[in-house]
Amino acid sequence: MSDKNVPEEEMTVELELEDGKTVNCEVITIFEVDKKDYIALLPSAQEGIEDEVWFYGYSEDPKDPNVEPTLTFIDDDEEYEAVADAFDEYLDSLEFDDED
């Protein structure tokens, strides 16, 4: 897994859910699993959703960096598990780095 090194300043995205509700989320990190990019999002506490991390497929337009990235829902259970496991490894690496 490689971390795309999200900048230190807080980045947020606004997601529109299936029911039309809009949720603001903090970007935790963008990372790679099996040569595909994914994003980990944390809904803001104001949304009433706590301690829940959301994972989406993530892609940017390589020809135009000004185009907004695309987030895609992960339908496949095995793919989702692989992404969740990679994210857990990312968190473990942060804890390990903090011990130094």
Image (spheres, rainbow, N blue to C red):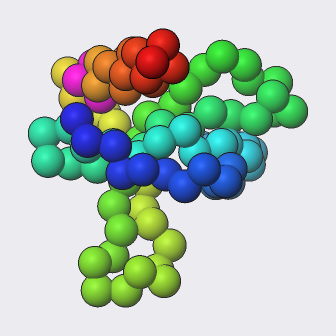
Helix, strand or loop for the magenta stretch, by majority? helix
Q: Is residue 40 left or right of residue 15?
A: left
Residue 50 can be seen in this image = yes
Q: Position of residue 59 (x, y in %)?
A: 33, 61
Q: Position of residue 39 (x, y in %)?
A: 43, 44
Which quadrant is the N terminus positioned in?
Answer: top left
Q: Residue at left 47%, top 42%?
A: 29
Where 20 sits versus 61, above or below?
above
Q: Start and end of the magenta stretch?
A: 80-84
Q: Is residue 78 left or right of residue 96?
A: left
Which quadrant is the C terminus positioned in?
Answer: top left
Q: Position of residue 40 (x, y in %)?
A: 48, 37
Where 71 sits versus 32, above or below?
below
Residue 87 can be seen in this image = no
Q: Residue at left 42%, top 50%?
A: 5
Q: Residue at left 72%, top 19%?
A: 50
Q: On the image, which quarter does residue 80 sit in?
A: top left
Q: Is residue 58 left or right of residue 54?
A: left
Q: Residue at left 13%, top 39%?
A: 34
